[in-house]
Amino acid sequence: MANIKSAKKRILVINTRTDRNKAIRSRVKTYVKKVYQAVESGDKEAAAESLRVATSELSKAGSKGIYHKNTVSRKISRLCAAVNKMA
């Protein structure tokens, strides 16, 4: 355990950020799952709407540094491809 005051603070800050990052990652995963569920059920309108929401959430997570920008781009591309394949 840290003895120095600044090191103790860093531990608290890291724990806070870790919790925030986990929550955002979990939220993104939920929206991505909703897109794939809509694609599997064949509901094109629901898939398009959930794609819009998931894309927004992924972009936000990327801008906050939770995901790398290339990872965000890849995930969005795969989601779009899955939705476009429905047609």
Image (cartoon, rainbow, N blue to C red):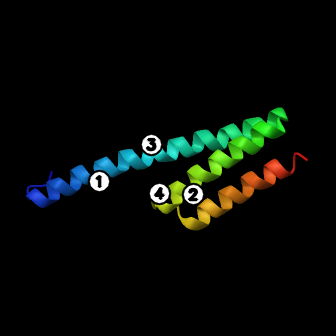
- Name, please, the residue furthest toward the right: 87
* Front-lying residue, 3 or 61: 61
- Could you say which disc has been placed on residue 59 in the image? 2
Answer with mark 2 or mark 1, whichever residue precedes in sequence: 1
Numbered disc in front, either 2 or 3:
2
Disc 2, SS: helix
Disc 4, SS: loop
Confirm or deny contact between disc 2 and disc 1 (CB under 8 A). no
Find residue 36 and report its image quarter: top right
Q: Amino acid at mark 1?
A: Ile
Q: Amino acid at mark 3?
A: Ala
Q: So how many labels did they put on this image?
A: 4
Q: Amino acid at mark 2?
A: Ser
Q: Residues within 10 Å of mark 4 (few under 14, many from 20)?
A: some
Please give left or right for residue 87 compared with residue 72 in the image. Answer: right
Please give left or right for residue 43 compared with residue 60 in the image. Answer: right
- The residue that appears at 69% across and 42% down in the rendered structure is 50
Q: CA gap, disc 4 to disc 3? A: 11 Å
Could you say where residue 56 lies in the image, as x and y percent from the top left?
60, 52
For residue 12, above or below residue 71: above
Q: Which residue is mark 1?
A: 14
For residue 34, above or below residue 55: above
- Could you say which disc has been placed on residue 23 in the image? 3
Q: Residues within 10 Å of mark 1 (few under 14, many from 20)?
A: few
Answer with mark 2 or mark 3, whichever residue precedes in sequence: 3
Q: Residues within 10 Å of mark 3 (few under 14, many from 20)?
A: few
Disc 3, SS: helix
Confirm or deny contact between disc 1 and disc 4 (CB under 8 A). no
- Could you say which disc has been placed on residue 66 in the image? 4
